[in-house]
Image: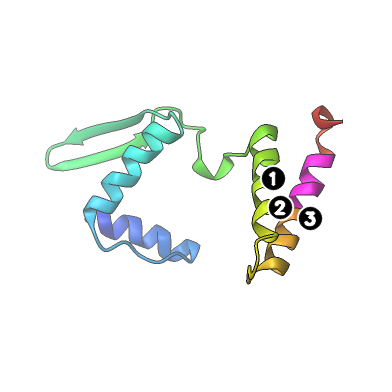
């Protein structure tokens, strides 16, 4: 089975749109390695190549925003919702409420 087929099977199970290019997959692998500072192991057996995280407990789904990132996001969204003719005020308000709940549950922000 080809890499793209395996990736698309996983994406389909999670409800995501399938990828159409191998370049997208290789770009995503590079992003994981650089953005999350997570080394990717590449192992080749014959013509088959296997990719895995060096840390078997790592998952991009476990990544969380820091308190500083949440505060910055809150400030940015607050400014955006006050723009004239902004169409998504209710959606942004909902997001801001959720961020507030998270921020005020974090003891380090008291």
Q: Between marks 1 and 3, how big is the CA–CA gap?
A: 12 Å
Q: Residues within 10 Å of mark 1 (few under 14, many from 20)?
A: few
In the picture, the quarter occupied by the C terminus is: top right
Residue visible at 31% across and 56% down in the picture: 6
In the current view of this chain or complex, which residue is farthest to the front? 84
Judge from the rendering whether residue 3 lies leftward or rightward of residue 73; answer left or right.
Answer: left
Point out residue 18 in the picture as x, y percentages from the top left corner: 35, 65
Q: How many labels does the image show?
A: 3
| Secondary structure type for disc 3 | helix
Residue visible at 45% across and 64% down in the picture: 16
Point out residue 95 in the picture as x, y percentages from the top left corner: 71, 57
Q: Residues within 10 Å of mark 3 (few under 14, many from 20)?
A: few
Point out residue 50 in the picture as x, y percentages from the top left corner: 27, 39
What label sits on residue 78 in the rendered view? Answer: 2
In the current view of this chain or complex, which residue is farthest to the right? 110
Which of the two discs, 3 and 2, sits closer to the camera?
Answer: 2
Judge from the rendering whether residue 50 lies leftward or rightward of residue 56; answer left or right.
Answer: left
**Residue 100 among those drawn in magenta:** yes
What label sits on residue 97 in the rendered view? Answer: 3
Residue beneath disc 1: 75
**Residue 4 among those drawn in magenta:** no
Pointers 3 and 2 in contact (C-beta within 8 Å): no
Judge from the rendering whether residue 98 lies leftward or rightward of residue 64; answer left or right.
Answer: right
| Secondary structure type for disc 1 | helix
Pointers 2 and 1 in contact (C-beta within 8 Å): yes
């Amino acid at each position: 089975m080809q890499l793209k087929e395996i990736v698309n099977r996983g994406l389909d199970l999670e409800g995501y749109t399938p990828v159409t290019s191998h370049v997208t997959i290789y770009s995503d692998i590079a992003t994981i390695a650089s953005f999350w500072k997570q080394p990717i192991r590449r192992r080749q057996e014959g013509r088959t190549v296997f990719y895995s995280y060096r840390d078997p407990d790592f998952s991009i789904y476990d990544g969380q925003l820091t308190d500083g990132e949440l505060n910055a996001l809150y400030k940015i969204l607050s400014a955006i919702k006050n723009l004239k003719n902004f169409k998504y005020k209710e959606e942004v308000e909902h997001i801001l409420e959720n961020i507030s709940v998270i921020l005020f549950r974090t003891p380090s922000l008291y």
